[in-house]
Amino acid sequence: MLVTTSRDPSMKARRFGKALASFLTLPYLNRGKQAKVEDETWLVVVEDHGNPSGLVKRSPGKEENLTFRLSGEPEVGRLKKCVPVVMGADALPIAQFFELEWVESSAPHQTRILSVTSGRIDFIEVGEAKFRLKI
């Protein structure tokens, strides 16, 4: 899976795409006019009036949408390679969307967590929220 943006993204959408890719330890591709490879899964950052507003997961023969409102400004920077887990009682659909492991309760050995609660997803690195999506 890789993360990309629409053809002519705003700076905010590009910054969010890079931060999301770094957090999920996925490659980020500045797409431009590049065509999609058929057998790959892409997370495409979509925007509304220059602000990131959703993700479209495009995989062979399937397309899923996750709409959100971004809360805070994600920091762009490289994070250590660490695959996050998704945590929360009702978080299984989010784990399946991002193709990550789902744990029902806190896992003490995990340093990177997507914490899903009612109406939001917190992207947490070593106990500190990096950014939040209101879904």
Image (tube, grey):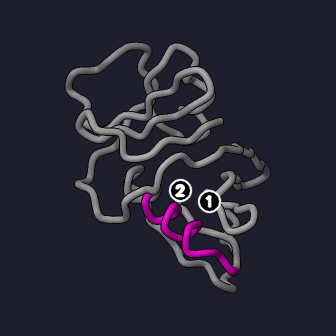
Q: Is residue 34 above or below residue 95?
A: below
Instruction: Tell me how many marks there are.
Output: 2
Q: Position of residue 106 (x, y in %)?
A: 32, 17
Callout 2 amino acid: Met
Q: In the image, is residue 117 above or below residue 8?
A: above
Q: Main secondary structure of the magenta part?
A: helix
Query: In the image, residue 126 lies at what x, y percent?
Result: 23, 37
- Give the label on residue 81, or none: none
Q: Is residue 14 left or right of residue 52?
A: left
Q: Name the residue at the bottom extreme.
A: 33
Q: Is residue 97 left or right of residue 17?
A: right
Q: Is residue 134 magenta?
A: no
Question: What residue is shown at x 37% (from left), y 59% (from top)?
Answer: 75
Q: Amino acid at mark 1?
A: Trp
Range shown magenta: 8-19
Instruction: Please say if the residues under marks 2 and 1 sit with CB atoms less than 8 Å apart.
Output: yes
Q: Is residue 118 above or below residue 61?
A: above
Which residue is at 66% across, 44% downward?
68
Quadrant in which the C terminus appears: top right
Q: Which residue is mark 2?
A: 1
Residue hosting label 1:
42
Above or below for 42 versus 133:
below
- 118 or 63, which is in the foreground? 118
Dot 1: within a 10 Å radius of its alpha carbon, few (fewer than 14), some, or many (20 or more) residues? many
